[in-house]
Image: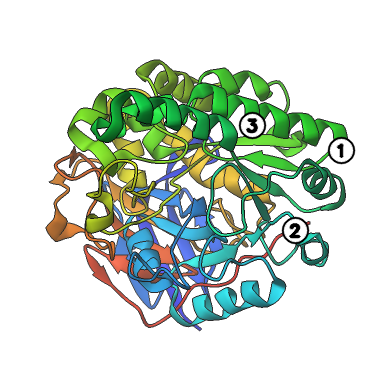
């Protein structure tokens, strides 16, 4: 048996901040007490002056294994994730080969068990033709099914209406969607290529991958979900217009249709393309400051249920290609909590709301077994942060395999000091303990 005691922490949990001690045995929180805990432990951490959050759960990452491991892999990116306070992640199926069969999916789980420092789950991918595989999914063992209703890789763009009707009507587990209408995007691209030729830059990205392309797809997905009573989760909302599709008048646990915002859509705007270029080229595109601010308001008024990263690393060489050839996506897991804490310092979001959107609500939305909260009987996934420790992001302090960050040059005024996964301190003041690995997430469905 192993025990850990955290003393004097300011615990950010379930809408409150309280001073308390936490006693952990065999990976489980066994005692939480505001009056202090006198019990002995194998190790004690004095958290005086630090804030203790539940470990973050990121519901959308691309860790690139198998097939794209020159960009990132399950070891390197989970390592970066725990350095950023993310203790659990849900990884996407557009690897090579695509995870569109149960056999391919289980191969990813087996690999994660060998190398992942954080807890993990993997989405089953969809095609126009794999409904048979989707119907065999055990919803207690995977986070959900992912549909790319917009541009993707390989055979994973699901654009056949009959296939979508079958998926939405017959698949019983959570369906997560990337929503953009591909023909609208292609038409916009041809218009701008004809007008600007090789002068196209990332500044045109939100015009090509436009509000219209996003709304047409997300509204279609919501309509299908309402028709079939599907459990739908719409990923990375990027426009103000889409917010009207989502409810904020019922509790999260009662919602059949939910929505996610990503850190980059809460931080950057189209004004940043001039300086950052392809390094902030994501799909869906970062759009206007008005969109960014509206998305934050959607987080605060509960139309947006969770905050995630869409961590999707590419190499520097790939990102420095001309705009049309440069891939979309960027690394974020190491700095997601830092960025949100910086927005807290700016008065835009409370600590309690950060815990709600990045920890509690992800657990509720996906019905994750005993994670996302600091509660007795729950797994001890925890992160300690110093809200008064300043550092600047440079390539020298990155853990991403790709070796760059869209936050390079940004000075954050908070720092993750400790990350605890299943009761084990896996990250402490810049150093890793890799002696244990994360666990497969389970779901109470």
Visible residue check, residue 29: no
Q: Earlier in the sequence, mark 3 or mark 1?
A: 3
Visible residue check, residue 242: yes
Circle 1 crowding by C-alpha within 10 Å: few under 14, some 14–19, many from 20: some
26 to the left or right of 226 = left
In this orientation, which residue lies closer to the viewer: 369 or 275?
A: 275
68 to the left or right of 142 = left
Circle 3 crowding by C-alpha within 10 Å: few under 14, some 14–19, many from 20: many
Instruction: Measure the C-alpha gap from mark 3 to mark 2.
Output: 30 Å
Q: Earlier in the sequence, mark 1 or mark 2?
A: 1
Instruction: Measure the C-alpha gap from mark 1 to mark 2.
Output: 22 Å
Instruction: Measure the C-alpha gap from mark 3 to mark 1.
Output: 17 Å
Please report contact status of discs 1 and 2: CB closer than 8 Å, yes or no: no
Q: Position of residue 130 (x, y in %)?
A: 76, 62
Residue 444 has which mark? Answer: 2
Q: Earlier in the sequence, mark 3 or mark 2?
A: 3
In this orientation, which residue lies closer to the viewer: 437 or 233?
A: 233
Decide: is 188 above or below 439. above
Image quarter (top left, top right, bottom left or bottom right) of the C terminus: bottom right
- Identify the residue under disc 3: 217
- Identify the residue under disc 1: 228
């Amino acid at each position: 048996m192993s025990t850990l005691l955290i003393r004097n922490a300011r615990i950010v949990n379930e809408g409150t901040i309280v001073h308390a001690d936490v006693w952990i045995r065999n990976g489980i929180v066994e005692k939480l007490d505001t009056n202090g805990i006198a019990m002995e432990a194998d190790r004690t951490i004095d958290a005086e002056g630090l804030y203790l959050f539940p470990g973050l759960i990121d519901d959308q990452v691309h860790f690139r294994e198998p097939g794209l491991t020159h960009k990132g892999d399950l070891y390197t990116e989970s390592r970066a994730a725990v350095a950023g306070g993310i203790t659990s992640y849900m990884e996407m199926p557009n690897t090579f080969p695509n995870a569109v069969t149960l056999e391919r999916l289980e191969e990813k789980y087996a690999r994660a068990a060998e190398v992942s420092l954080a807890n993990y789950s993997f989405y089953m991918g969809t095609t126009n033709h794999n409904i048979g595989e989707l119907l065999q999914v055990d919803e207690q063992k995977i986070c959900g099914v992912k549909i790319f209703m917009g541009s993707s890789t390989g055979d994973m763009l699901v654009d056949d209406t009959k296939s979508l009707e079958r998926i939405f009507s017959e698949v019983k587990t959570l369906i997560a969607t990337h929503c953009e209408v591909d023909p609208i995007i292609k038409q916009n691209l041809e218009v701008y290529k004809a007008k600007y030729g090789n002068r196209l830059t990332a500044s045109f990205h939100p015009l090509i991958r436009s509000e219209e392309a996003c709304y047409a797809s997300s509204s279609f997905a919501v309509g299908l979900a309402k028709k079939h009573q599907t459990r739908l989760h719409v990923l990375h909302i990027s426009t103000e217009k889409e917010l009207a599709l989502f409810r904020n008048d019922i509790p999260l646990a009662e919602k059949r249709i939910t929505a996610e915002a990503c850190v980059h859509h809460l931080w950057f705007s189209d004004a940043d393309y001039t300086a950052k270029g392809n390094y902030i080229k994501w799909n869906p595109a970062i759009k206007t400051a008005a969109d960014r601010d509206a998305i934050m308001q959607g987080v605060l008024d509960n139309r947006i249920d969770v905050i995630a990263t869409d961590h999707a690393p590419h190499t520097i060489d790939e990102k420095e290609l001309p705009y049309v050839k440069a891939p979309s996506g960027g690394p974020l897991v190491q700095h997601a909590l830092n960025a949100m804490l910086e927005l807290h310092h700016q008065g835009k979001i409370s600590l309690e709301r950060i815990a709600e959107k990045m920890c509690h609500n992800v657990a509720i939305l996906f019905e994750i077994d005993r994670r996302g909260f600091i509660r007795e009987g729950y797994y001890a996934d925890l992160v300690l942060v110093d809200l008064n420790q300043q550092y600047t992001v440079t390539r020298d302090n990155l853990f991403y395999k790709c070796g760059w960050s869209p936050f390079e040059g940004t000075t954050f005024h908070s720092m993750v000091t400790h990350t605890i996964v299943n009761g084990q301190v896996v990250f402490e003041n810049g150093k890793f303990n890799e002696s244990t690995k994360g666990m497969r997430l389970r779901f109470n469905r």
